[in-house]
Amino acid sequence: MEQHRTRSAPHQQRPPAQRQGPRPASVPAQAGAGPRRSALARRMPRPRLTGLGGGLFACAAMVLVGGICWLLFGSSLFVYGLLFLPVAAATALWVRPADLITAPIGVPIAFAAGVWPISGGSGGIGGHLMGLVSALSLHAGWLYAGTLVAALIAVVRKAVLIGRRRMPRRLTQ
């Protein structure tokens, strides 16, 4: 049995409406074209993580960092805190613009998840929980610093996005 096509052929897209008058020099020629990326920026990865993906990335990275600190550095919380800062920055840089608010929220959760292996508790679940609480309270400076890094990056990225959205309006007025 032969089936006939029920949908019509796709319509061709119309070219974008042409503006009247000369184009200002600061406006790119194409609507989607932004400033060219530098050579270093082209080599860097540009993942766009959702809010949940950013939190999962940070948690997985910090658990990995915690395991490495436990194996190589004798459960050093200083090394763990030092490695927490770039993970916080990467999380804030790689999250999607729509989910920027989740970066400073997910990063402290990741810190707590990763400090579990190196917290130094013993004697069952209660001892491990007390070691975790002690590690979080004694090294809260690293936690605050990483959260501040993620929050500052998120705020700057949001300000740049708002500025880009308003720029064409300023040029037409």
Image (tube, helix red, strand yellow):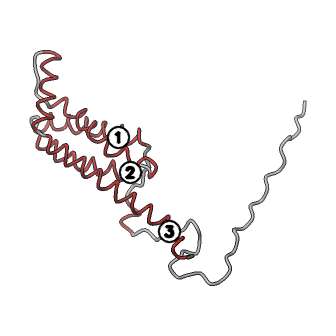
Residue at 74% across, 61% down: 13
Placement of the C terminus among the 4 image quadrants? bottom right
Q: Is residue 136 left or right of residue 151?
A: left
Residue 146 percent across, percent down from the top left: 22, 47
Q: Label 1 neighbourhood size at 10 Å, few (<14), some (14-19), many (20+)?
A: many
Placement of the N terminus among the 4 image quadrants? top right
Q: Is residue 158 above or below residue 19?
A: above
Residue at 59% across, 81% down: 23
Residue 84 percent across, percent down from the top left: 22, 45
Q: CA distance from mark 2 to mark 3?
A: 19 Å
Q: Nearer the viewer, residue 94 or 51?
A: 51
- Would you say the residues marked 3 and 1 are in contact, meaning their CB atoms lie under 8 Å apart? no
Q: Secondary structure at mark 1?
A: helix
Q: Is residue 92 above or below residue 111?
A: below
Question: Which of the two discs, 2 and 3, labels the residue nearer the N terminus?
Answer: 3
Q: Which mark is residue 57?
A: 1
Q: Label 2 neighbourhood size at 10 Å, few (<14), some (14-19), many (20+)?
A: many
Question: Which of the two discs, 3 and 1, labels the residue nearer the N terminus?
Answer: 3
Q: Which mark is residue 94?
A: 2
The disc labelled 3 sits on which kind of residue? Answer: Gly
Q: Which residue is mark 3?
A: 34
Q: Label 3 neighbourhood size at 10 Å, few (<14), some (14-19), many (20+)?
A: few
Q: Quarter-wise, where is residue 56 in the image? A: top left
Q: Secondary structure at mark 2?
A: helix
Q: Quarter-wise, where is residue 62 in the image? A: top left
- Would you say the residues marked 1 and 2 are in contact, meaning their CB atoms lie under 8 Å apart? yes
Q: Is residue 96 left or right of residue 107?
A: right
